[in-house]
Every structure is written in C-alpha cells, then in structure tokens.
Image (cartoon, rainbow, N blue to C red):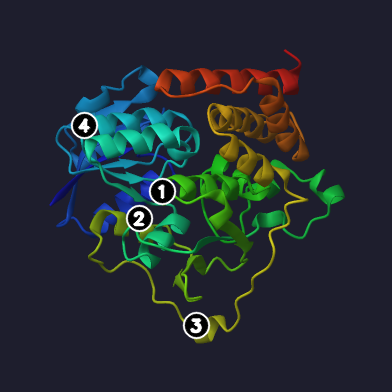
C-alpha cells in the first residue's frame, strides 16, 4: 500500500485524490492531511481516512518536513503561492512528489528543479496537459522531442469580442465549458493566464526552451497535449476531461488501474483545433513575458494575479482589469534575482502590494 501525504485535501484536486483512494483502498492509504481553512471538512476526512497527521494551515500549523516522514508520495494539491512551501518541504524530506500545484514551478521552477535534482527527488506532473506530455514521452521527462503542444479549451469567452469581455461577470467566468475546478484556476482559464502558466511549467519540467513550447485551442478538451518528434510524427494523449485519470496515474505509473470511461471516438465524431487568440487574452502573453524574464518576475506575476482574481470575484474590478493589474505590477516591481524561498516570498509580497495599489489606489 502506498501512503500519501495530501496537501490541499479539501480543494477541488484534493477531493478527487481522495475519490481515487476510496476507489482503490487496497492500493492507497493516507498518512497526512493538510487543508487551508476548512476545519470541519478536515475533521470529517480525518475520521474517514485515519491519517497520522491532520493539520489546518489557517491555525498556523505547517510542521514542514515532518509532514512527509511516513509517506511514500507527497501529493501537493494546495492552490497558489502557498503550495511552494510544501513542495520544497517534500523535496527536503526526499519524497516522490505528485505535483498539482502549478505555482511551485511557475514561481519557483529554477529553485524547485535544482533542489529536486540535488536530493534525487522525482516530480510527477498532475496537470492534465503535463500528464499527457509525460505519457506521450513514455513516462520520461528527459526523453528527446522536437516540440511540445499544449491544448486549451479557450474557456467560456473564446468567441467574445473585447466589448463583450468588458461586461462579463464572475458567475460567467466560473462556468467553464468542460472542466470542473476551483474558482481561482477557473478564472485563470477564462483569461488564458492558466495556459501561460502551463507553458512555464513545461519549460521547467521538460527542460525546453520557450521557442519549443506552444498552445492551440481545442474546445472539446479531449486531446490533452501533443509531443512532436524530429521525424515529423506526433503522439497525443486523449481522454474525457476527468482529473481523476492524471491524479491516479501520478500515483500508479507505469501501471494503470480502472478509473474513467473509455473514449468513444465514433460518438464524438469531430474534434476542433484553432489558433490561440492572444490579442483578446493578454494574460497569456504577460505570463510568457514573465517566464522568459525569469528571476522574480514570475512570482510578481502570480502574486498580482491572485490579488486581481480575488478582486474580480468580489466585484471590485472588471474582467479586463485582471490583465491590466498584472501588467501594472510587472512594470512597477523592479526585476531582481530570486534564488531562495525568501526571495520568492518577497517578490510575491511586492507583486500583491503593487496589484492592490493598482486596484484600490493604496
């Protein structure tokens, strides 16, 4: 039985991890549970899964590497910048990591990958797109390839004009056409910031220059990503949009266990692809710019984005102001190196401060 330390147990991904455990209790157990602030849910889960450790981060509990002492796999499903702390702690403990916290690589990719290499820690991607690349590369993050292509549904506003985008509501942004996710990542999908984040992740996971990573629109969310090879061949991973598949595979690969319905191509009949409309969704370009700049820029980007999305969901700013807020933060926080967790935390703080000043004027 593989023992899992699950960080972010009450969020969207965390709940699906626990669904996988329920489906295969003979294969998986829970050694630790950490939630953000839902104490009642944490208590109920502790009663069900009997972990050795159950903590609520809002109470000031982290316990760092001790969280991972008795686990086989650290599953990092916490959202936002907070997940980076746990990713680094799991690396420090020398544990295999199933990584669903994209900010760990967006913000701290250089630090995370260097520490993982130094400690000999394996990082297995959980995002559906990166799991697809991982599968297409034969479960080898060091396999040769020519180009990586990520697919994007385009979110709920793919066909909106700029004028229509100025009037969209939070409720509309949260109505993703194919995936069910938490509010922050759902809004990030609507702005296409999330796809920019995923390109930064691919840069670090697969050691690829940004010129070798691209994204295309694929509204059905059936093809999750493709890998092109030198001879012109491409290998893609297909499946219904169900996060349980990459979650479970991160825990079992190279073995596979029953999980989701088989894909019925005859029933689908048609799949569509198209160019990603960067001109309508500037968050995508801002993410790529920050990723290429490196240093503290991705942390500033993410901190500002978290504040901007919070303000949008609260009704304090319009949908286009999300991108404007991020752009302002990147312009006002000076470029600097970010070689330690403290450097990244400072960049996150400054990004948030610049975003709040842009939004609220203070």
The residue pinned by badge 2 equals 141
Q: Is residue 63 left or right of residue 134?
A: left
Circle 2 sits in a helix, a strand or a loop, which is it?
A: loop
* For residue 204, above or below residue 111: below
Q: Of tags 4 and 1, which is closer to the observer?
A: 1
- Alpha carbon of mark 3 to alpha carbon of mark 1: how far? 30 Å
Image position, residue 284 (x, y; %): 66, 46
Q: Residue at x 61, y 23 (%)?
A: 335
Q: Residue at x 68, y 45 (%)?
A: 285
The residue pinned by badge 4 equals 93
Q: Is residue 335 left or right of residue 7?
A: right
Query: Would you say the residues marked 3 and 1 are in contact, meaning their CB atoms lie under 8 Å apart?
Result: no
> Between disc 2 and disc 3, whose residue precedes?
2
- Alpha carbon of mark 2 to alpha carbon of mark 3: how far? 29 Å
The residue pinned by badge 3 equals 265
Foreground residue among 11 and 47: 11
The residue pinned by badge 1 equals 205
Query: Would you say the residues marked 2 and 1 are in contact, meaning their CB atoms lie under 8 Å apart?
Result: yes
> Between disc 4 and disc 1, whose residue precedes?
4
Image position, residue 164 (x, y; %): 83, 50
């Amino acid at each position: 039985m593989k023992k899992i330390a699950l960080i972010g147990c009450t969020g969207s991904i965390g709940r699906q991890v626990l669904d996988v455990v329920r489906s295969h209790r003979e294969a998986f157990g829970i050694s630790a549970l950490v939630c953000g602030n839902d104490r009642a849910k944490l208590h109920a889960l502790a009663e069900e899964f009997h972990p050795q450790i159950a903590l609520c981060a809002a109470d000031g509990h982290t316990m760092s590497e001790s969280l991972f002492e008795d686990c086989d796999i650290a599953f990092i499903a916490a959202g936002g910048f907070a997940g980076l702390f746990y990713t680094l702690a799991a690396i420090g403990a020398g544990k295999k990591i199933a990584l669903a916290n994209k900010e760990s690589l967006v913000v701290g990719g250089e630090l995370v990958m260097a520490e993982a290499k130094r400690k000999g820690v394996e990082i297995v991607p959980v995002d559906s797109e990166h799991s697809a690349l991982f599968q297409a590369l034969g479960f080898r993050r060091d396999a040769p390839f020519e180009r990586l292509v990520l697919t994007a549904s385009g979110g709920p506003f793919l066909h909106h004009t700029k004028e229509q985008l100025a009037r969209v509501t939070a409720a509309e942004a949260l109505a993703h056409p194919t995936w069910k996710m938490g509010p922050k990542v759902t809004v990030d999908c609507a702005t296409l910031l999330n796809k920019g984040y995923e390109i930064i992740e691919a840069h670090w996971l697969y050691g690829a220059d940004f010129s070798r990573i691209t994204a295309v629109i694929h509204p059905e969310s059936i093809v999750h990503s493709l890998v092109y090879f030198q001879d012109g061949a491409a290998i893609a991973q297909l499946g219904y949009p169900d996060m349980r598949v990459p979650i479970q595979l991160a825990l079992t690969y190279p073995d596979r266990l029953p999980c989701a319905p088989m894909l019925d191509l005859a029933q689908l009949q048609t799949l569509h692809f198209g160019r990603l409309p960067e001109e309508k969704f500037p968050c995508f370009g801002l993410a790529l710019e920050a990723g290429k700049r490196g240093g503290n820029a991705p942390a500033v980007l993410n901190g500002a984005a978290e504040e901007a999305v919070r303000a949008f969901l609260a009704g304090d700013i319009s949908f286009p102001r999300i991108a404007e807020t991020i752009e302002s933060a990147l312009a006002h926080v000076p470029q600097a190196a970010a070689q330690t967790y403290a450097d990244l935390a400072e960049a996150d703080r400054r990004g948030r401060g610049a975003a709040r000043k842009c939004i609220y004027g203070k």
